[in-house]
Image (spheres, rainbow, N blue to C red):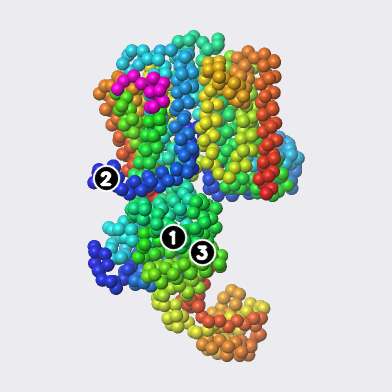
Amino acid sequence: MDYDPAAAAAPDGFGPPTGDGADATDFTTSGREAAATPGAAATATDTPPHRTRDRIADLVVSRPLLRQTEREARVWVRTWKGSLVSGLLTPLLFLGAMGLGLGGLVDENSGDVAGLSYLVFVAPGILAAAAMQSAAADALWPVMSGVKWTKTYHAASATPLAPSDVYGGYLVWMAVRLAMNATAFLVVAALLGGVPSAWGVFAVPAAVAGALAFAAPLAAYSASQDSDLPFPIIMRIVVMPMFLFSGTFFAVEQLPAGIRPLAWVTPLWHAVELARGATTGSLGLAAVAGHVAFLAACIAAGAWWGARTFGRRLAA
Amino acid sequence: MTAIALVGTKRTLRVVERNVRSYARMWPAFLTGFLEPIFYLFSIGIGVGELVGDLPGPGGHPVSYELFVAPAMLATSAMNGTVFDTTFNFFFKYKYAKTFDGMLATPLGVADIARGELAWALLRGTIYVAGFLLTMIALDLVESWWALLALPAAALIGFAFAGAGLGLTTYMRSFTDFAYVGLAITPLFLFSATFFPLSEYPGALAWFVRISPLYQGVAIERALVLGDVSWSLIGHAAYLAAMGVFGLRLATRRLGFLLQP
Amino acid sequence: MSTDSPDGAADAPLVQAKALTKRFGDDVAVDGIDFEVHRGEVFGFLGPNGAGKTTTMRMIACVSPVTDGKLSVLGMDPSRQGADIRARLGVVPQEDNLDSELTVWDNLVIYGRYFGLPLAEVRARAVDLLHFARLDDRRDSRVDPLSGGMKRRLTIARSLVNRPELLLLDEPTTGLDPQARHLLWERLYSLKREGVTLVLTTHYMDEAEQLCDRLVIMDGGRIVAEGSPRALVARYCTREVVELRFAEPGEQATAGDRLTQDGARIEPLADRLLVYTDDGDRTAASVGESAGAVPDSVLVRRSSLEDVFLSLTGRTLLD
């Protein structure tokens, strides 16, 4: 039992079971509502039917996977404050401390880093790294909770949802949440002067892709485990070094030649390169294609493994 | 009486013994906990350090960035080592595992539990700091014989944060409250003159930093490791001691109220 | 009653309570009760949920402060010598609070260490206790995978590590299947034979009847009756009970009226009619005529503590 406040984005209320059975109820109620009244709003309110809500409800009905996404979204609506702290506030604090505080020292001394002020250098790094850290914590404890402690995933797969839908829906929500946090971060970074290029908007999908590339296989791993004892270890010896050494705070060229390849195989490095290329408008098409291909491959492989593991764990 | 209140009795040791046993099976988790400040030392201290060059040190003479950051990471190591066990793990034991209920049916009382948990956290923190200190020596980042006091100073830092952790955790109601622990720890970690000196802060903010808890530890450790001791360190030490004592007493009182109504 | 020296006389009661009261704010959980527990007996608190049994046990165990009245445990005062008393007690709480971060073995050892026992001695006792709990092959297992019955046996074994003179058990078999219950009772019998004094709470009348030498019946924080199971049945009940079930509620009501007119003692329940009598067979044979209706089923049984509780409070033990 070893939760790590500094490294782990505090799980959003997904600690060892507090017996919040409302989650399972949330899901099945929304599924029944959506199935029974396709035209009405999936979130039953007393306002008149709204066209966008109708369309979302129809979409959710047609794609079982999205019902799990809806469930995750409902939980988020109730717990967003806590998740805001780790998902947005912490990265912003890092931006302030490293980008501005430390940045002042760096700029005085070196003048620039590869032609960029330190703030501009570090902002996309923190963007991508924060997304990855948040996704990692979310792929560990909450997934084990759904599979073992509160068993909400089991409840979901007792309905017409397949285990792979549960997994897919979970990943879709993670992408949505990460995108929201990343966008908010990007806006603040831009206001501080850390985003010179308009291409910077692409930093958000880059960060999300990098995070998913790591979280998709990690969720598969987590679902296959019986104990959460390895989790803090993974956060500390995999996630934390990735966070610190993948070009986030200093270029990987500064790493000793022997270790540099380790950075190149991390999804985070590719995401950071893409994000930095976007915010500074300085990445060539070939490089973009290469990084994107790597991340896409990671996501595909992770998703395949995840669907299999969820299938095994939830159907047993 | 106050000696016992502070130091504890044999029963305090039983609580420590229980934690040692439970970690004996989880030693990988135990060991990896001390890595984080070391990673930061390499990444920011050395990696970014190349970009920063020299800074004015406590005595006024310039120090390399690594020398500047290392003692701050030492203080952070002391904080990290004690904060895990006195927040998350403590909360889990008291609220979900009901570990303390079993203990209270024996001659142990709530004061023994509070002191024992603090003593264990302190033990863990000190082990982490010792490891970090050895790393610093290996990297040639220790400048002065005053650094011998760095370990007891770190114990004081750990005591302060362990006491505060225990005291504040008794007010938490569920795991969602723990997001706020991160919200407290992260700014402390980033903004206690850890990565850049007080001079980089705009005026008003600098005063906030001066009164924040980790800064006291950072100031003490930086002075000791770089050999620039002065009487002002006593003030920092007193702050930390008071924080620890107050937190411990608060925790004892709250535990009695929560577990034995 | 001496309060500072333990056990003034060998036959002094191990637990003595006078006007013992516990209040939580405005809520009175235990309302001025008197009782005594003698050495070597099995003493029971029988009553429905919420009667105040657990609260009373926690006061005896010196983990909950007494609000009013006098309580002496092992001749000592809980408010001043709590730790010393606890050193000689064994406690088996209602919810197992085994240490989930330790193995079965470590749970036994560390608990012994809480009492200040030397490690070598604790280890020796732990071996015996594992055997007592029939958990020798689960020594290195963590606690969570164990079944409910195993956890309960481990909790009992753990509570014996300090060789207590007085063992407190709060609802020891609640939630266990019948086989686990019987195994547990058997373990408790063997403890009693070794001379350990047991105090237990329960809402199961069969448990109270089987295990207890003496018991008190609690309801709403008060003691409503006291004595051995047999004495209680004899005092508050007839020897036997005839249970009648009718097809229609109306028939039950009419039958009830007819029988009462004839002077029989009855107790109507939701689904059946109880007729108290000293000769169940004779009553059952004639019930067709005296009730004026033919019942669907007739059951003759001996009176139990459940009937005692019913006649004293008008309610059943299990609500």
The answer to whether residue C313 is left or right of residue B151 is right
Q: Quadrant of residue A203?
A: top right
Q: Which chain is home to disc 1?
A: C
Circles 2 and 3 on the same chain: no
**Residue placed most toward the observer, A252 or B173:** A252
Mark 1: amino acid: Leu
Dot in front, 1 or 3: 1
The answer to whether residue B170 is left or right of residue C307 is left
Q: Which chain is home to disc 2?
A: B
Check disc 3 and report its element: helix, strand or loop: loop
- Numbered range of the magenta stretch: B133-145
Mark 2 to mark 1 CA distance (whole Å): 34 Å
Examine the rendered structure and indicate whether residue C93 appears above or below residue C216. above
Residue at the spot x=35%, y=65% of the render? C165
| Magenta-span inclusion, residue B223 | no
The answer to whether residue C5 is left or right of residue A189 is left
Q: Does the CB distance between marks 2 and 1 fall below 8 Å? A: no
Q: Categorize mark 2 by other alpha carbons within 10 Å: few (<14), some (14-19), many (20+).
A: few
**Residue placed most toward the observer, C270 or B162:** B162
Mark 3: amino acid: Thr
Q: Position of residue B175 (x, y in %)?
A: 50, 42
Q: Categorize mark 3 by other alpha carbons within 10 Å: few (<14), some (14-19), many (20+).
A: some
